[in-house]
Image: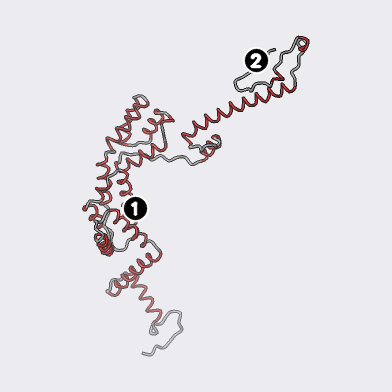
Amino acid sequence: MSTENHKTDHIPELSPRYSETHSDEQLGGNTYRMDPLLELELAEGREHYNQAVVDKTMTYESTSASHALDVPPGKDWITMISRALDLPKKEIIRFDGNPMNYWSSIRNFEECFDESVGFRFMLNHLIQYCDGKAKATIVQCALLGPEEGYRKALELLEEAFGQKHIVVHALIDKMLNIPAIKGTDPDNLGRLSREMRIRGLTLRQMNYVSDLNSAKTIECTFLKLPLHLQREWVKVACRISKTGRESLFKDLCEFVKEQSDIANTRYGLLVICGNNSDKRDVGVSKGKITMQQAYNMEELVIATSPYVVHPTWSAQVIIL
């Protein structure tokens, strides 16, 4: 038997003392037995080769998995996959054709899927997570090839529902259609603050901040505030103008958020309750009381009057 049959690319060469040839007498016919040291070195070589193959396989698999799982260098990809399976399932936002929801829905879909899962898979799920007019717009794209169909579906959705000027006007109109806030209403004030921040964030991402900073948008939003907050904003706007610039939508947004935070603190709610109590007192003084309030007042008079005989009292002589 020749030692060439045991050679591989990754097995180190044998030391010179094991590389000599053996005669037939040394081999003893077919009863040759390998030297123990030679056998040990060959075993170590095979182990080294097997480990090298495993390392290369792990490196390849880790590189492939890292595209989907963000496996840090040096981490076990099997462990990372196991952890990923334990994570909550990603929630995909459905799109119903409302232009105001177009950008958030498409951004969410692209974050949940990428090209590594295949264009056919992405196209099928894009159709699945659209409803109404949006689904009717792209459902026929399933007849095209995977990549062509997916890209065409995205193009049709943007053309029908994602044109920036349409989205901008829809967002601003919804904010301006919020009813004006009356008196001290922390709930509606908080709602207005949220709507303003959402519009500001979305339009900044779309590079349409100029529409928010128009005088019409700022003035219409300003008129949504209750009268006492309008007076406070006038003071803020005056201080801003003294710095040499005009008030921006961002300034009004920060003002409304601050006032909303103040109104929803414990002390802010106490002030609101106090104001409501004062109004009830004013109503009583003007004679505007409910039947229940009148009944309660009558019971109080009966209970405290010394001139009324109560059923539980013993017979009394009332001296007038």
Residue 115 or residue 307, whichever sits in front: 115
- For the C terminus, the image quarter is bottom left
Where in the figure is residue 57, as x and y percent of width and height?
55, 28
At label 2, counting other C-alpha atoms closer than 10 Å, the crowd grade (few under 14, some 14-19, many 20 or more) is few
Residue ID at (34%, 24%): 144
Q: Quadrant of residue 269?
A: bottom left
**Mark 2 / mark 1, whichever is N-terminal:** 2
Q: Amino acid at mark 2?
A: Glu
Residue ID at (37%, 73%): 296
Q: Quadrant of residue 3?
A: top right
Residue 57 or residue 110, whichever sits in front: 57
Q: Which mark is residue 57?
A: none
Mark 2–mark 1 Cα distance, whole angstroms, equals 78 Å
Question: Is residue 76 rendered to the left or right of residue 112?
Answer: right
Q: Which mark is residue 4?
A: 2
Q: Quadrant of residue 139?
A: top left
Judged by depth in the image, the label closer to the viewer, 2 or 1, is 2
Q: On the image, numbered disc 1 is attached to which residue?
A: 194
Where in the figure is residue 301, as x and y percent of width and height?
37, 79
Kindly state the secondary structure of the residue where label 1 is placed.
helix
The reply to whether the C-beta atoms of the residues labelled 2 and 1 are less than 8 Å apart is no
- For the N terminus, the image quarter is top right
Q: Is residue 195 above or below residue 92?
A: below
Where in the figure is residue 207, as x and y percent of width and height?
29, 44
Kindly state the secondary structure of the residue where label 2 is placed.
helix
